[in-house]
Image (spheres, rainbow, N blue to C red):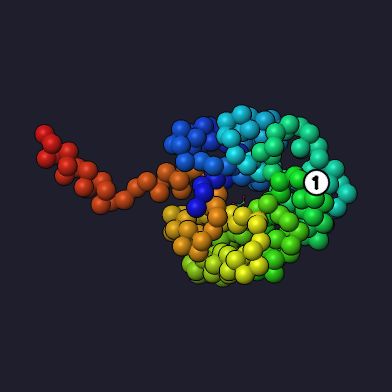
Amino acid sequence: MKIFIDTAITEEIKEGAKLGILKGVTTNPSLLAKSGRTLDDVITEILSLVDGPISAEVTEADEETMYKQAHDIVKMAKNDNITIKLPMTEDGIAVCSRLSKEGIKTNVTLIFSVSQALLAMEAGATFISPFMGRVDDYYHDDDSGFELIRKIMEVKKNFGYESEIIAASIRNVKHVEQAALAGADIATIPYKVIKEMYKNELTTRGLQIFRDAAK
Ligand code: G3P
């Protein structure tokens, strides 16, 4: 499973890039607001830091304005790694079909059901983003997100869709493990959760034992 970082904070991306395991970046309007920077500014810097798909989300709602905004982002980025993140709406899916035919990378976001995923895959989305954490929050359990990814992967396999499935809205290490067990192609992970993935109490203790022995 490939690891993307879910942030618009470029310091986190720089740190993540040093770890040598990042294959892409996803942003969204909330993450952008946290960075306090404009989309053009942040995306240009991220494109110079990571050689992989970088998702930038449109904010317009109707098909024609969204399509135009998508093209403005592509023009600004001047880089094939730019990926247009589109909302899971009728207009978003229509724009996804148009951009896919033009060879522009797309990421359909806010996916919460198998039927939404099916529509996005039929529209030729390069990536689709089911939200694990928000599904678990909504159903007050810790396996709805896992089940969502598992079922979408099954549908993808049944029909040979090429869209890559990004497990998104990852809140903790358990979500990452569930995404991998469900067969997600990619997990987009906040920086602090990536750091947590390195840790295990037994590793810390084992290291201490070996270091003491080596003295
Ligand atoms: O980029 C989409 C996503 O990962 C959002 O996560 O934590 O706002 O549910 P969250």
Q: Give SS at disc 1.
A: loop
How many circles with numbers are drawn on the protein? 1
Q: Is residue 156 left or right of residue 74?
A: left
Quarter of the figure with residue 39: top right
Q: Position of residue 195 (x, y in %)?
A: 42, 43
> From this viewpoint, which residue is outermost toward the front?
160
Q: Position of residue 180 (x, y in %)?
A: 47, 58
Answer whether residue 178 is visible to the viewer in this image.
no
Q: Is residue 142 left or right of residue 73?
A: left
- Say what amino acid the circle numbered 1 marks: Glu
Q: Residue at x 66, y 61 (%)?
A: 161
Label 1 crowd bin: few (<14), some (14–19), many (20+), radius 10 Å: few
Answer whether residue 47 is visible to the viewer in this image.
yes
Q: Is residue 125 left or right of residue 60?
A: left
Q: Position of residue 18 (x, y in %)?
A: 46, 33
The answer to whether 50 is drawn above or below residue 201 in the figure is above
Which quadrant is the C terminus positioned in?
top left
- Nearer to me, 54 or 199: 54
Quarter of the figure with residue 87: bottom right
**Ligand 1 closer than 8 Å to label 1 CB:** no
Q: Residue at x 57, y 31 (%)?
A: 49
> From this viewpoint, which residue is outermost toward the right?
64
Residue holding disc 1: 102
Q: Residue at x 54, y 67 (%)?
A: 150
Q: Residue at x 85, y 52 (%)?
A: 63
The answer to whether 17 is drawn above or below residue 123 in the figure is above
Q: Position of residue 112 (x, y in %)?
A: 64, 64
The answer to whether 211 is drawn above or below residue 176 in the figure is above
The answer to whether 27 is drawn above or below residue 155 in the figure is above
